[in-house]
Image (cartoon, rainbow, N blue to C red):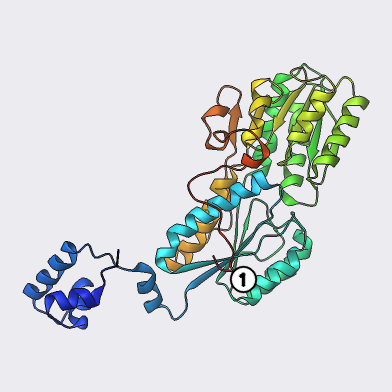
Amino acid sequence: MKRIGIPEIARLANVTIGTVDRALHGRKGIRESTRLRILEIAKSVGYRPNMAARALSVRRTPIRIGICIPREIHYYFDQLCQGIAAEAQRAELSGVETIWRRTERLGEAEVETIEELIHAGPGALILTPGSPQELTPVINEAERRGIRVICVDTDAPASRRSTAVCVDAEASGRVAAELLGGMVPVGSQVAIVTGMLHIEDHRRKTESFLGAYPRFCSEGVVAEVIEAHDDEDEAFQKCFALLERHKALAGVYVNTANCLPVCRAIGATGLAGRLKLVTTDLFGEMRPYFEKGTISACVYSRPYVQGELAMRLAVDHFLHGTQLPKAHFLAPQLVMRSTFHLFREMRAPAGRESAAPAPALALPRVSPSGTV
C-alpha cells in the first residue's frame, strides 16, 4: 500500500505543501480552521510522519553508531548483539544508523577493526575490549576525535572511554563464592575456570571469588585457576585433567561464557551431581545440565540487557543530550534449577544451532558498506 504523504494531503485539502507542513507541525502562519481541516484529512487517510526523514531534515548527517562485538562464543555474544539490534531498530525512526563490524573472537583483530570503524566517522562506538591494553590508544584517539566510546560486557578502564555497561564483576565473583561456599562442606577445595585473565571482566570476577570464598567456606581453598581462553577443546582437556589431579575437588566456578566443556568433563569423570558447578552464562543447551543437577546455579551476566542499555545510552546522548555516566553496572541475576525454565534464553530448543535466543528480531545483515 502506498504511503500517504504531505503532497497527497495538500492535494486533498486544496492547499500548498507548505501549508500542510505548518499545520502538521504546529507552526504559525495559517488559519485555525485550515489547520483543523488539514489535521482531520491527515487522520482520515492514516497519515504517519516519517520520523527518520524529519530527523535528517534537522541534521545534515544521520547519527551513526559503530559496533564491534565478537562472534564467539556465539551463544553469549549473539545475545549481546540482539540487545543492541533491538534498540537500534527502535532508533532507526529517529535517523540513527548502525555500522556492524564483528570480529571472530574476543581480542582477535580488534585494533584493525575498530580503526576501520573510526575511519567511517561514527558519532559513537560500542565495543567489547578483549585486549584493553592494545585498545587503549585506539579508544583515546576515537575520543580525541569526538567519537563517544562505550565499552560493553567488559571494560578498558585505563582508556578515556566515555562509559562502560557491564555486570558488576566483583559482585558476580562474590555471589558465586557465597553460593558455592554454602553448597560444599567446610574446608572444601574448589577451582575457577576463566577465559583470559588480561580481560578485565574475567580478572575481576576471579580476584573477587578468590578473596570471598574463604569467608563463605571456613578453611576452604581455591586449588587452581585455569585459563581456557574461551576455547571449548582447551577447556574440556584442562578441566578433565584438573578433575583427575584433584580427586577431592568439591566445586567449580566458571566465570566466562564457556560452561559446556566443563559440564562434559564433569560427566566424563562421573562427577555429575556430586561436584557443585556455578556458571555465568545461560542458553538452551544448558537445559539438560540444569535438569540433571550438573549445574547447581548460574550467576547470569545478562548480555541482552547489556547490549540494549549500551545502545540506548548512545541514542539518548545524541537525540536528547543525556549525559553519559562514568559507568553503568548491572546487578548479576541468580538462576537456579527451580527457575532456569522461566528465562527467555532457555525457551529455544536445545542444540547448538539454537543456542542463541531467537526473538522475532533477527540479527542485522551487514551490507558491503557496513551499514544495516
Find numbered disc 1 in the image and state the secondary structure of the residue it sits on: loop
Q: Residue at x 44, y 64 (%)?
A: 92
Residue 36 % position (x, y): 10, 69
The quadrant holding residue 122 is bottom right
Q: Amino acid at mark 1?
A: Pro
Looking at the image, the residue that sits furthest to the right is 245
Instruction: For residue 192, say whether it is visible.
Output: yes
Residue 28 % position (x, y): 17, 79
Q: Residues within 10 Å of mark 1 (few under 14, many from 20)?
A: few
Q: Is 179 positioned to the left or the right of 147 in the image?
A: right
Q: Residue at x 62, y 49 (%)?
A: 78
Looking at the image, the residue that sits furthest to the left is 33
Q: Which residue is mark 1?
A: 368
Q: Is 216 positioned to the left or the right of 282 in the image?
A: right
Q: Residue at x 22, y 62 (%)?
A: 46
Looking at the figure, which quarter contains the C terminus?
bottom right
Instruction: For residue 26, say whether it is visible.
Output: no
Q: Is 245 positioned to the left or the right of 121 in the image?
A: right
Q: Residue at x 78, y 61 (%)?
A: 133
Residue 193 % position (x, y): 80, 37
